Amino acid sequence: MKVYNDYFGRFGGRYAAEVLRTPLDELQAAFTGAIADPEFLAELDRLGRQFAGRPTPLTPAVNAAAEIGGAAIYLKLEGLANTGAHKVNNVIGQCLLAQRMGKPRVIAETGAGQHGVATAAVSARLGLECRVYMGEVDVRRQRPNVFWMDLFGAEVVPVGSGARTLKDAVNEALRDWSDSFERTHYVIGSAMGPSPYPDMVREFQSVVGREVVEQCRQLGVEPAALVACVGGGSNALGFFAPHLEAPEPRLIGVEAGGRGPALGDHAARLSGSGAPGIVHGYKSLFLTDGDGQVAETHSISAGLDYPGVGPQLAHLGDSGRVEFTTASDDEALDAVRTFARSEGIVFALESAHAGAAAIKVARSLPDDANVVVNVSGRGDKDLFILARALQPGRWAEFLKREAQEIEDA
Ligand SMILES: Cc1ncc(COP(=O)(O)O)c(C=O)c1O
């Protein structure tokens, strides 16, 4: 049987408040039992197919590759999963675990809103009570996802403390869980948090990597590099999972370069100036200010706007198995435009960071090489940000008219 570890090199652990020992032990036992139980795995697979629409396609980006030059580019379209991103893979697994533990209520934190939408949708499907914590800033910039969570019957709680983004939403969710764990499971949305979450989230996301291996085999494609964006690390780890013990292919994680290298303008922990620390129950690399306090971050994509990174990715950076780089806000916007025009595919702004890095990697490789990009989500949720950035005048006119029509009605 597979052995799960609390630590990944010098990172990881379970630095949770005493009160959370009980639910974390219970979760560890439920997860290790479930992942070895053929019935649980069959149910996970069934919901993945019937509800999330797995397997998602791997498509050659022939036009983009011709325009960019260099290696061939393949896109793994996680955005075609129900609810629009890879987040649903982990949520299905954790919500099935909640049922296995006899817990009728789930809570979640969300940044971009994709994890919240996935949790709300799976809760609707499985009949679970659902509450989602979301920073007030994210509520504003990801309004469409708040609408969907509401429609799915979830309660969205705006968080007004701190920077009012993802890290503050995690704090609130942990607070809720401390008081409610007897009937509540906390569905963490990335490969971070106290053990067993990093292992568990990677395992539930590894379906992406397994599908890519099989799809590449069918297409006769041997990847030279896999490229994924890195918020907390769940889409990257799931995508990279089958290759972590092998020396090849190159595994490239892309963080938010934001507006520039000054602290507060980016979220580059691994490729920037992250320092070891313990936050949200785990030890990893975090962006901190001169006093050692967790720093504020910036990214055009809410899902990459987080000061920490999952412990396994921090370790894989230490060991050199995963390379890290950044893409700026502007490079991400350019990548959205490039792939939309050439392929008819709209990347989520998070995934567009991987797209931007893949463009550079493809250019540096010969034309018989292959680069595979994890398109972790689709850009529909970013309509308001994209339209404002790419067509400000026409978008403002449309919004004014809409607002007027609502007022007049
Ligand atoms: C579409 C999409 N991609 C990537 C991420 C980043 O998260 P992770 O690093 O856990 O994959 C998010 C987070 O909200 C997201 O919505």
Image (cartoon, rainbow, N blue to C red):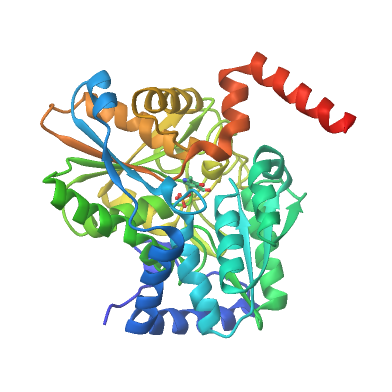
Query: Would residue 209 be seen by someone viewing this image from the given angle?
Result: yes
Name the residue: 23% across, 37% down.
371
Q: Residue lying at the far right in this picture: please name it.
A: 408
Q: Nearer the viewer, residue 251 or 105?
A: 105
Question: Does 68 sit left or right of 125 as displayed?
Answer: left
User: Is residue 237 shown above or below 385?
Assistant: below
Name the residue: 58% across, 85% down.
102
Name the residue: 20% across, 59% down.
245
Q: Quadrant of residue 259?
A: top right
Q: Quadrant of residue 179?
A: bottom right
- Name the quarter where the C terminus is drawn: top right
Question: Does 309 sit left or right of 206 as displayed?
Answer: right
Q: Nearer the viewer, residue 251 or 110?
A: 110
User: Is residue 156 shown above or below 15?
Assistant: above
Q: Residue lying at the far front in this picture: please name it.
A: 409
- Name the quarter where the N terminus is drawn: bottom left
Q: Residue lying at the far top in this picture: please name it.
A: 393
| Picture coordinates of residue 38, whole percent (x, y) | 32, 83
| Picture coordinates of residue 378, whole percent (x, y) | 47, 41
Query: Would residue 287 be seen by someone viewing this image from the given angle?
Result: no
| Picture coordinates of residue 209, whole percent (x, y) | 29, 56
| Picture coordinates of residue 348, whole percent (x, y) | 48, 38
Q: Nearer the viewer, residue 331 or 171?
A: 331
User: Is residue 355 shown above or below 128?
Assistant: above
Give the mark count.
Answer: 0
